[in-house]
Amino acid sequence: MIKQVPTYAKSLKDLCTIERGLNVNKKAFLIEQVSAIIQCKSPLKYKDPGCPTISVMTGGTIVEKALLDLRASVNLLPYSIYKKLGLGELKPTSITLSLADRSVKIPRGIIEDVLVQVDNFYYLVDFVVLDTDPIVKETNYVPIIL
């Protein structure tokens, strides 16, 4: 250990007295949002695209603004639209629907194999028919959820 003291003292002296240049040649790539924060630029703001809706035709009736919800596991049809379209008799069902607000809805029934036309394509769709609020707000009214 005594032999190492002069070496240690020399290394310590070199660290304290010799100015060494910082040789760092590494690049970091930042995503646009981080880069904008560093450069004091505000990132681009996009408008809310709203609900994706399409026009569909079923039973010879065109339904505007059918909500296209790819995450939905059921296709919903309000009872008032079902009556207007005259799609036949409802089949009873034991399904209960748990909504996002944790409320539970019991549908009136299901209607199977309804022919729905989207542009030039035809699809057979099973609908769960549900009672909805009779007061309709036109600004966000969506008659069908596909």
Image: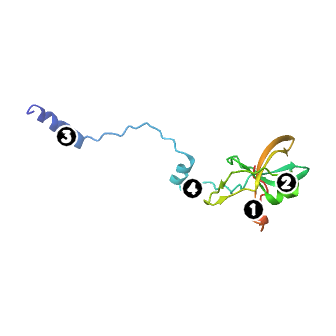
Q: Which residue is more in the foreground, 69 or 83?
A: 83
Disc 4, SS:
loop
Q: Amino acid at mark 4?
A: Lys
> Could you tell me which quadrant the N terminus lies in?
top left
Q: Is residue 58 above or below residue 140?
A: above
What is the distance, in whole Å, between disc 2 and disc 4 at their CAs?
Answer: 44 Å
Q: Amino acid at mark 2?
A: Val
**Which residue position is annotated with label 2?**
63
User: Residue 31: x and y, percent?
Assistant: 55, 45
Q: Give me the residue at 85% from left, 54% from top.
A: 63
At label 1, counting other C-alpha atoms closer than 10 Å, the crowd grade (few under 14, some 14-19, many 20 or more) is: some
41 left or right, relative to 14: right
At label 2, counting other C-alpha atoms closer than 10 Å, the crowd grade (few under 14, some 14-19, many 20 or more) is: some
Q: Which residue is more in the foreground, 63 or 127?
A: 127
Q: Nearer the viewer, mark 2 or mark 4?
A: 2
Label whose residue precedes the other's in the sequence (1 or 3): 3
**Which residue position is annotated with label 3?**
12
Q: Amino acid at mark 3?
A: Leu
The answer to whether mark 2 and mark 1 are in CB contact below 8 A is no
User: Residue 119: x and y, percent?
Assistant: 86, 44
Q: Nearer the viewer, mark 2 or mark 1?
A: 1
Q: Nearer the viewer, mark 1 or mark 3?
A: 1
**Which residue position is annotated with label 4?**
41
What is the distance, in whole Å, between disc 4 and disc 3 at their CAs?
Answer: 45 Å
